[in-house]
Image (cartoon, grey):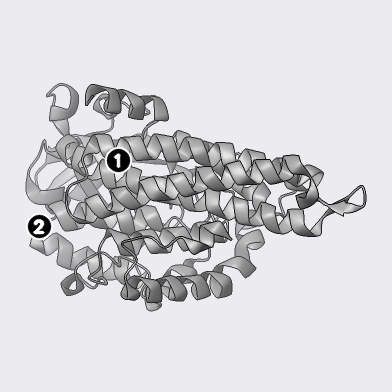
Amino acid sequence: MILDDYRSPWLTEDLADLQQLARTFMQKEVVPNQARWAEQHMVDRDFWRAAGAAGLLCISIPEEYGGGGGTFAHEAVIAAEQARVADDAWANSVHSTIVAHYLAAFGTEEQKRRWLPGMASGDLVGAIAMTEPTTGSDLQRVRTRGLRDGDDYVINGSKTFISNGTHADLLVIVTRTSDEPGGRGLSLILAETRDLPGFQRGRVLEKIGMHGQDTRELSFVDMRVPAANLLGGVEGRGFQQLMEQLPQERLIIAVTAAATAEAAVREAVAYAKEREAFGQDLLSFQNTRFVLAECAADALAARTLVDSCITRHVAGELDAAGASLAKFWCTDIQNKVVDRCLQIFGGYGYMMEYPIARMFAAARVQKIYGGTNEIMKELVARAL
């Protein structure tokens, strides 16, 4: 197949070995559990430790903090293999690619040594609490407050759409710590949630897709967190920290989008070869062949864009506009390709036991989280 003949230029032998490890892990540990995870609205807690034991958590965090010592390319390999099996339950990208890197980039030495090894082993599950019920992509309007009281911050507020909300042991909270307007008053504070007074997990959210992911509402009522948990130790740097890390978050979304588009084409080609209609397989019909040819071209174009961005990001050259461009274009392509591939399945494409149906249900939010695609286009336009 043309998509399988293409090899990403950044895929070294080391990364190819990781790809095979991740592929085997997904087939053994993920695929058999997907239906059950969807029913219980979360992956098993022990699954995080299994992923840690396999070396798949925090793989781009330095070894001195328990990580794998790799780069973003290692994270991309794992995310692509997860997309290949149509899994949307395991929010490793939030844990390893986002939360761990806030700590690695901005944490004090004590903070990094305290929390990163546990995240790498799976003993700690990380989540980030940005979005609020009245605040979406505009993070400067965050209303959750953390007021200094002696050696603690007292935090009050609520967050929503929090991935890893059930399992989260370590939570990065976007918090307003001063009356400075806009982003100048924001800080990032970490909370260890186990038996933490004032920390409340709200309802599990009923989503269109991603049923196996533990997405919840969270609230904080006079929740006391040690002042030593302020990320980096200096107030008012939260917005800057968010802006510096958001490009990586948006790029991992693009990676998943491109890999999902490829997976959808593979599923549709396999189905079209075996499904018969009017005495011949579906691939014999010109319309089916043309649709799949166009989808393969779109998927390959998305992959090459992502490959370019990965290469630039690993080299430290990818800017916010470039990551935003990849995020909006690849997720638009993902939705387009998955929708067209689902049509080839007919009624079976609407059945959740088929991976294509799960891909379809999960695709829509890719254009929303990490910053809506409309915001992404505005950021790109400003850089023109």
Looking at the rendered structure, the kind of residue marked 2 is: Thr
Looking at the rendered structure, the kind of residue marked 1 is: Ala
Q: Position of residue 117 (x, y in %)?
A: 25, 70
Other-residue count near label 1 (Cα within 10 Å), few / some / many at <14 / 14–19 / ≥20: many
Q: Position of residue 279 (x, y in %)?
A: 92, 52
Please give the residue where the numbered disc 2 appears in the rendered image: 108
Q: Position of residue 193 (x, y in %)?
A: 33, 55
Q: Who is closer to the viewer here, 137 or 331?
A: 331
Q: Please identify the quadrant where the C terminus is shown.
A: top left
Q: Residue at x 66, y 50 (%)?
A: 356
Q: Residue at x 45, y 58 (%)?
A: 80
Residue 228 in sight from this viewpoint: yes
Alpha carbon separation for disc pair 1 and 2: 27 Å
Please give the residue where the numbered disc 1 appears in the rendered image: 323
Residue 169 in sight from this viewpoint: no
Q: Who is closer to the viewer here, 274 or 66?
A: 274
Relative to 212, residue 142 above or below: above
Q: Residue at x 48, y 44 (%)?
A: 216
Other-residue count near label 2 (Cα within 10 Å), few / some / many at <14 / 14–19 / ≥20: some
- In this rendering, would 182 be left or right of 156? left
